[in-house]
Amino acid sequence: MPADDTKTETAGRDFIRDIVQSDLDAGRTQTVVTRFPPEPNGYLHIGHAKSICLNFGVGQEFAGRTHLRFDDTNPTKEEQEYIDAIQADVRWLGYDWGANLFFASDYFEQLYQWALHLIRNGDAYVDDTPPDQMRAMRGTLTEAGTISPNRNRSIEQNVALFEQMRAGKFENGACVLRAKIDMSSGNMNLRDPVLYRIMHAHHPRTGDAWCIYPTYDYAHGQSDAIEGITHSICTLEFEDHKPLYDWLLDHLPVPSKPRQYEFARLNIGYTVMSKRILNRLVREGHVAGWDDPRMPTLAGLRRRGVPAAAVRGFIAKVGVARANSVVDLALMDFTIRETLNPVAARRMAVLRPLKVIIENYPADQTETLEAVNHPDVPDMGTRAITFGREIWVEQDDFMEVPPKKFYRLSPGKEVRLRYGYFITCTQVIKDSDGNVVALHATYDPATKGGNAPDGRKVQATLHWVAATDAVDGEVRLYNTLFARPDPGADGDVMADINPHSVEILAGCKLEPSLATAPVGQAVQFERQGYFAADPDGTRSAPVFNRTVGLRDSYAKPAVTGRPAAG
Ligand code: ATP
Ligand code: MG
């Protein structure tokens, strides 16, 4: 069973849910309808997951419905690849829009007719003021804007010009359609905002049918109204757009009156969530693609082995509020561990191998030992692992001159091999440069299974893999993609990229069952963390991504050991 389906997360109450509940109680809302409105100009990231969980969560909890609506109003940035990826990601996250898949582009004709309606009521006009001049004329927060000389064109002129805009008579940027609201409003969004711009661009869905495209502000609220959205939930930066959202609904013969509510967007330390920057990371080759496991995209998290349940659980922990904040990355990692721990199968893998030769074990012999797949879940069963004369252990688990409190292997020291025997290190083999290249040891046949009949204790249990059937694999250890908690705070976000965001270990020794581990489904490498097979790997050369370490990677173990070279 995928890690996903074993846990459900209950979102708590929050101000949005309180509003919805009171609308239902007061009869202002009959059926709750929400929507998730991505622009298909990139892959979804963990920030979008907050919006998805909120919108779909509210739809489910209040027995309403949630639409997936693509806000595809800017063809120069949008692609079919993104439309497909977004749908796959929402499904993966565990949400279903049923028959309610919509595109703002489906409403282009209606939106155009409504624009004519505004013009005919004297509420919109075509303006051919050059763009830079128009920008200057908007004024500032302290200074009123300047009225465009085109503001008083006749309705007939405006209708004719707008029809010519649609007919492709003008170049890109030659003119725009603006709402006629208030050039001295304290809210800049009301200073005759642009409703339509000319873009001679091929649209993924409407092809070349249009060369004028509605702005977000114009398309969004009207799309909400067409679909009968009751609660249009968006992030705080749209708070200042709300008066425009309402103005348009009030000036158009729309079939319903949705209401907009804003919540704080998700920010996470060391993480960038702007699609514009994520797009640059991909385009400029800083990462291997949108699904690079270092990316905060849902595709990246999935490839890293993060189950959807962990994403939902994390979002539930963060909650929904109106105060902006930055969430600690450790909360995400904690939630991933908490989700994976009860379900991830245990396996053994040696990431930085050091050979141990067990002198008193016959060279021509191997045997099969039984290893449990999960210490707390007997139903997950056991598996057979091979033991033989030569095994691999972790370089870190040996120190020739151990400090106090180093309980693992060192000359003369006895330790337990997990599911196996006690071994005692008898000799250290070095190359001509003095580097440790192998260890000799003896094993105690009476300790099979991990206990000594005489009751003597050892202080450490090591993971290991038999040399006879270990599979060589690659393991990719990830670090944050950015080197500081607030990437870009000094200006150039690209300058804050962590040069050590991935460490690739080749020649790792994996127990054979890992060769067929399902891609993307995390297992626990005992004592090391959670790892998931990467699609780059094959049966004979598996590749694993570290999903998350076993404990906070910032908290270093008190004592580590490593031979001089490996
Ligand atoms: P970005 O700034 O990353 O490009 P966006 O807002 O332009 O994001 P959209 O595709 O328009 O991307 O977003 C779809 C929905 O997801 C919007 O309702 C938006 O408010 C929401 N959303 C985007 N980023 C976040 C975030 N970090 N936290 C919560 N919701 C978000
Ligand atoms: Mg947007």
Image (tube, grey):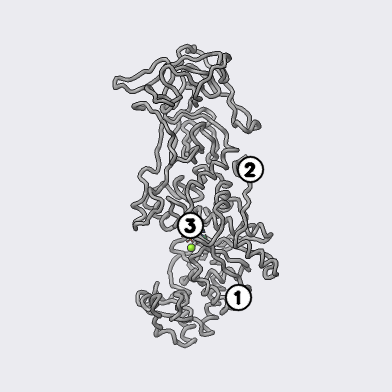
User: Which is more foreground, mark 3 or mark 1?
Assistant: 3
Q: CA distance from mark 3 to mark 1?
A: 36 Å
Residue 361 percent coordinates (x, y): 49, 13
- On residue 6, the disc is 2
Q: Amino acid at mark 1?
A: Val
Residue 414 percent coordinates (x, y): 47, 18
Looking at the image, residue 170 lies above or below residue 87 = below
Q: Which residue is mark 3?
A: 325
Residue 169 percent coordinates (x, y): 42, 77
The residue at label 1 has a CB less than 8 Å from ligand 1 = no
Frontmost residue, 531 versus 165: 531
- CB-based contact (under 8 Å), mark 3 and mark 2: no
Is 414 left or right of 24, judged from the image as shown?
A: left
For label 1, the crowd category at 10 Å Cα-Cα, with few meaning under 14, some 14 to 19 and many 20 or more, is: some
Q: Amino acid at mark 2?
A: Thr
Say if residue 520 shows up in the picture. Answer: yes
Looking at the image, residue 353 lies above or below residue 200 = above
Q: Secondary structure at mark 2?
A: helix
Q: Amino acid at mark 3?
A: Ser
Q: CA distance from mark 3 to mark 2?
A: 30 Å
Is 437 left or right of 541, judged from the image as shown?
A: left
Q: CA distance from mark 2 to mark 1?
A: 44 Å
Q: Earlier in the sequence, mark 3 or mark 1?
A: 1
Q: Earlier in the sequence, mark 2 or mark 1?
A: 2
Q: Which residue is mark 1?
A: 254
Which residue is drawn at the image coordinates 57% and 75% (left, top)?
249
User: Which is more foreground, mark 3 or mark 2?
Assistant: 3
Q: Residue furthest front?
A: 404
Say if residue 88 shows up in the picture. Answer: no
